[in-house]
Image (cartoon, coloured by chain):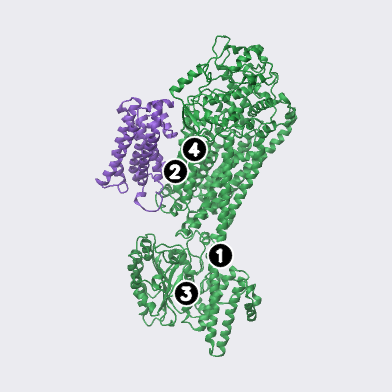
Amino acid sequence: MTQKMKDEAGKFICSFIYKEGNKAAHHIAAEMDILSDQLAFPQDFSYTLKKICIADVQLPNLSFLSRMTPKQKVLEKIRPTTLHRKRLIEEREDSSHSNFNQPPHVSAKKSKTDSSRAEESGSVPQVAVTLEEVQDVKSPSTSGGDSKTTIYSTDFVYLNTPVSANDTPQYEPLINPAVEEQEQGPRLSTSVSPQSYLGYWQGGGEDPEFGSFLFTTKKGTDVSPKYLNFFESKNSEITWSWRAATLVHLYYSLGASSRVNAKALVCCTTLLEIFEYFPKLPGIPKSNDSRAPEYCTRCSWSRTTSDRSGEKALKIFREALDNYKLEDAFLTKSLIHEVASSVTMSSSLTCAKLASCTMLAVVLQMIGIALFVLGFFPVKPALPGISGLESYRAPTCNEDLDANATTKIAPDELKNLYKEMSELPPSYDRLILMVVDGLPAEFILGKGDQPPTKAVMEAMPYTQSLLSNGTSIGYHAKAAPPTVTMPRLKAMVSGAIGGFLDVALNFNTQAFLDDNLLGQFHRIGWKMVMHGDETWIKLFPGVFARHDGVTSFFVKDTTEVDYNVSRHLKAELVAEDWNILILHYLGLDHVGHIGGRNSILMTPKLKEMDEVIKLIHTSMVQRPEHCQEQTLLMVVSDHGMTYNGNHGGSSYEETDSLALFIGMESKLPQDVSATYNVASQVDIAPTVALHFGVPIPRNSIGVLIPETSYFLTDGQSLRALELNSWQLLRLLEAQLPGLLCGNTHVNDINRVQTLGFCEQEDSVEQEFFRLYLEAVGMHSSWRSQEGQDFRSNSSGDYRDTVTAYYEFLNTASEWLSRRATDKSSDLLVFGIAAMLVSCVIFLSILFWLCQEERLRQGQSLHELDDFSNKWHLDEIYIFVIILVLVLSLGSSSMVEEEQYIWNFTTSTLYLIFLRRSIQGDNYKKKNLTFSIIVVLICGRILRGWHQGGVNWVHLPDISKWLEKANPHIISSIQIFSGIFIIILGSFVLYVIQSKRVLVLGVHAAFSVSGFLVLLSMMEPNYMSTLMPRIIYVILIMTVTIAALVSPWASPNSSEKPLSVKPNSATSHSVNVVLKSPIFGLRETLYLIGWAYTVCWCVLQLLLHQPINAMPIVLILLQIWASIYYFSASELHHKQWVEVAALYFLGMTGHFGLGNSNTLATIDVAGAFMGLSSHSALLSGILMFSITYTSPLLCLLSMTTYISLKNMSHLVSQNMSLGHHIQLTLGFPCLVPLTLNSIASTAFTIILLLMRNHLFVWSVFSPKYLYVCAMTVCVYIGVLVVFVTKLYTSSVFLHREKMQSSTRIKHANLKQPYLQ
Amino acid sequence: MGTTNINNNVAVSVSDAFRVHLISVLGLASAIWIAHNIYTINLTTHPIQALRLILVFETPILISLYSCLGRNREQCSYLVAVGRGMLGLLAGAVFMVLGAVTLGAPVGIQYMKKTIYWSLLMSSFTFVPTSCVFGSSWMDWQRLFANTKPIGVVDYMICIPAHGAVIGAWLGAWPMPLDWERPWQEWPVCVSYGALAGYLVGVFASWGVLLVFGKRENHFKGD
């Protein structure tokens, strides 16, 4: 067993040395040089040698490693005291003591450490070699007499493997199966390579002479010269087991160095790097940097690591080795191959898995967002156009809704036409609409059967008297959420409950374009006057003949707002010229916001309102007799308020708004209660429309308020109901296509009767249609009866007809309103669940990638300072940023002022990078620090360029300052920016020193388009549609050619490679890169990435407003400076930190370009650049690209980032395509996806929680649209990067295969390995 | 390298550290007390005056206290240490202004005075003690602020309150963009409050740290 194990151990180490190839050989050679310098064998025998440990002993089979299994015990670290030291030294001097000649074994004071070693860990592992074992050794070559004496003072062992000195190294690739088959016994190609470096060390390689190597220790004891005969030439024929000896020496040295006073490590530390390939050895520093040997093979830590951290590093080495099991070390040949190819084999599998997981998560997220949007913003099919004459005709199947038919008719004519067709004379000619903002109906009508509180009753005596004497009728008009003024006003005048999306879709205008009452009145030529909340003026621009708007901005003002309305009242009441007077009092709402329902200001305010009502009503009553016009006073409120005075949600207190009709004197039957009626806010629209002789607005879902029809004749009231039913039927038809047409065959009463009996099979359509036909049927029978005899028993019929109509109307209205406002909870739950699942998938993939990277890369030795805390400050801070962002999304003012957050967090992140760049030795690299400072300065200018946001948008900023100044300055800045981008682009391109035709061509195309853009900047009038189109074409051609052609045209790996400037930092990395085809790939990607970014910038220079030219340049500069910093620095930020930093830069730039979370800042002007006709798709794409310029630029620049990122330490020679893509593309694609997924998922949940928030429609919902658009933006960017990388890599792989197939013919050629 | 530091810091004991901290906290408290009770001003209403008052009280105290520590450490004259403290105050103020502007502090004539006073205050919490004790020794500055690896009593005394002040000021900037329309949201009021609070927390934290680890350090050094 032992012999086999010895072989395996040796082979194992050798194979990994071999795998490291050229580089490792160099390291080892250097190592040996150092050692040989120190231990140059002297000719003079009197020279005192350090202890030499060479013996012919059996390998202690490494079992001591497994012997020290970790225990759960508290672990010790030794702090030797002076006394102890003295004692130890004595012990070592004393030959009788067991510690004689041993390294100091201190077990003095014990304190806790994080070492996982057992109690015996204070001592160096004892390579216990007993005499018996030695006698077992069969090796005959050890010279007899001396060997016994050797044994007793031996610390180290060597293994006797017959290896011929003439066995010249074979350099076939390890995984070449052809070579494997040749390997037999000791002649394995893998097992001979260590001899090569030993030979190199000893004899210069021509005539390798083995056997003269000293392993030094630091014991300080001298070595007896008797060992020297081992070095005599006769002994050089002995084959020494250097491999095992080296390994054991390494282990011994680590032990000796991990003691508290150790500052140096003397051993072949290259072996430590080799251990990186042991997958079960986490935490061992890896050779990810070529500087590693430079630092760790010297016998001192002093350059980068202090004594403290050196100690820590040693401890980690020791721990790792202690926990190393025998089965980890002894691998069979097949296992070695497995390890060697694990990189290739396993990850090509996992790469596919990774890609599919990502795809799954992306699809899930898209589904989730779509479901949520559908659920949260229900889209109801609205009827376009405006109600006209057709609303007085019964709806028919497939009727042509010609909205323009009525516009040609003159107002007065139209009015008369309406009057004729409706068969319903207008009851009133004048309307006074008094809106009291925020007045709960409870104040006037009481809650349920309870009258209002006494204080409120006393505050409004006149109104109460109106109610009690039957001259007015009041309703609890249920308002639909959101109970905020503007949507409520819209609902009142249009009778429709608007969705959010239709607000979003016409974001560029605030005007209310749907069919509404005011529009109808305007159309019949009525004159309207408006005083109060300026929301009305914004909603209906140009409708009012006179208006005086007050703003609701100053919430603390409770008197002025109302005085500004009331001061016009007297004049308006006397004036005869208006038909509609709208008064909107904001004061009561302000009182509520300040002090709630029970505020001391409430009673005076109610009294004031009462006074206004009294004033209006008396003026109505005392109107001169000659005025035949009838006036209706409607006192309504847009919404109620909670006890604290807030509103916006859907509680009873908030939705309980008032509708009070005053002016129907002596027309109310006594049995009708004036106070306890319940209606809906949307009912106001049809009621007013029917009473004032205009068509009901087309999308109204309201129902004629029953009691208002009491003063109509029976026929008129039935006609009114009929009109209302027709209107609702048309709306139903829009939502349920086929309602009319599908049911035409049942258009007779008999069928209705039969249908009535088989209700069980009713669908919604049939149900509605049945109800409708029932009502119509009764109406027509009532009508025929009316014609025959003078209503003998028509009263009953009439009642039945009315009931039937209301049954239809109420059912339909309820169904419609439910469709408009109900958020489908199923959709919301499924949407959020899908998003959460996708977020978790993203996070776990990312976590897995990080683990993978950590295992692969670990940490290089010169970063030992940070060994103790695995988390760097920048990594922790990224999590802080994410947390802060998620939390800030929940606050409306933080959402409004998001630009502050991004700027603040991103600047802080770069300040942390700055701090990192002056740690350790790094401060000497001035250009790194400089590049971060460039990013910071650009960021600050960007921040100051546009103030942005909502609340502080009026504060001065650079763009306002420039706009105020001479306009030439802006255009000259714009031209400067254009020139700067062209120059900067050329500079960055020629950092690749390749002057190939393709590069030149791409550059020429870019320059041409750049100059064309410059030209169009200088001559804005020259800007026909042709010019932008030419630029579009050139840019698209440039990018396409660069992306498609350059992988084929790039130099292949055998040509002289070209050095990319930022990577020529270390000669070693270049050495590796030169060897691999990766280099050509990187250069190609660099070119493509360059083309993406500069062409994007030029395009945006064209599309954006002149003022934004400079910010685009600044963003580009920031991105390039950061990419330079990340690629040139050897600080080894985690890759995900770098990608996240780029993503944050993109977001900061997004706000730096003047964007905000309101829809108002979207730049619509640029979206029509070069488009001759209106195309929603093209202009939408352009608008999207303008808005998301910065994030897309950052995502596109990931291509450049990938190309420049120094992956040489991760890249092995024989790497599959999948693995390569996973390594290079994993983080740049997954980090943006994950960050976006976290943000969108968090905001979706927040939006759901905030659905009753006051600002849900004004702040959160627009932000949600931005979040959705950002998701699309991230998908696009990541897809572009992914496809580019995939395409380029597969082209290279293909070319590589082609090349290797030709190369196989010349396979006999051997490349010299040691250069 | 590391051992030399330990040897130099032996002169400062934990109780010295307590005394220094106590005096500086008392100085700060008395400045605020005087501002409130004698001049009846506070940071919110009169940021410039209040900051000036705190500066006038606190900076001399800090310079004189930490110059003593500096003298103990390197056997240089007390006056030289004071001079280094003054220079550190100015250099630190420049540094702080740059940092604040980078993070989005308003730039403008009307804010200039406030920014300067605030930066002087920040500087006296962070740069003054360090420059009094360590002068212009890059290794020490780097150890304290770039690597945050304090070794010994003096390092802890300087490092933790300085970091506290910076982090406190950073956190203090968060309420600024909110639309609460409170007067203390103005630059640099809440940032100054944050810095003061952070400094105090840092002082107490360093007390705590020295109490816990100080004994052990002493034992180790005495060995």
Relative image position of residue A1227 (x, y in whole percent): 57, 42
**In the rendering, which numbered label is found on residue A872?**
4
Kindly indicate whether the residues beneath marks 3 and 2 are on one polypeptide chain.
yes
Mark pair 2, 4: CA separation? 29 Å
- Badge 3 or badge 4: first in the primary sequence: 3
Amino acid under disc 2: Ile
Relative image position of residue B85 (x, y in whole percent): 33, 32
Colour chain B appears in? purple
Colour chain A appears in? green
**In the rendering, which numbered label is found on residue A688?**
3
* Secondary structure of the residue carrying numbered label 1: loop
Kindly indicate whether the residues beneath marks 3 and 4 are on one polypeptide chain.
yes
On-image quarter of the N terminus of chain B? top left
Q: Nearer the viewer, residue A807 or A505?
A: A807
Residue A962 vertical position relative to residue A55 in the rendered view, above or below: below
Residue highlighted by disc 2: A941
Q: Are marks 2 and 1 in contact (CB under 8 Å)?
A: no
Amino acid under disc 3: Val
- Badge 2 or badge 4: first in the primary sequence: 4
Residue highlighted by disc 1: A380
Comparing marks 2 and 4, which lies closer to the viewer? Answer: 4
- Badge 1 or badge 4: first in the primary sequence: 1
Residue A594 vertical position relative to residue A692 in the rendered view, above or below: above
Amino acid under disc 1: Lys
* Secondary structure of the residue carrying numbered label 3: helix
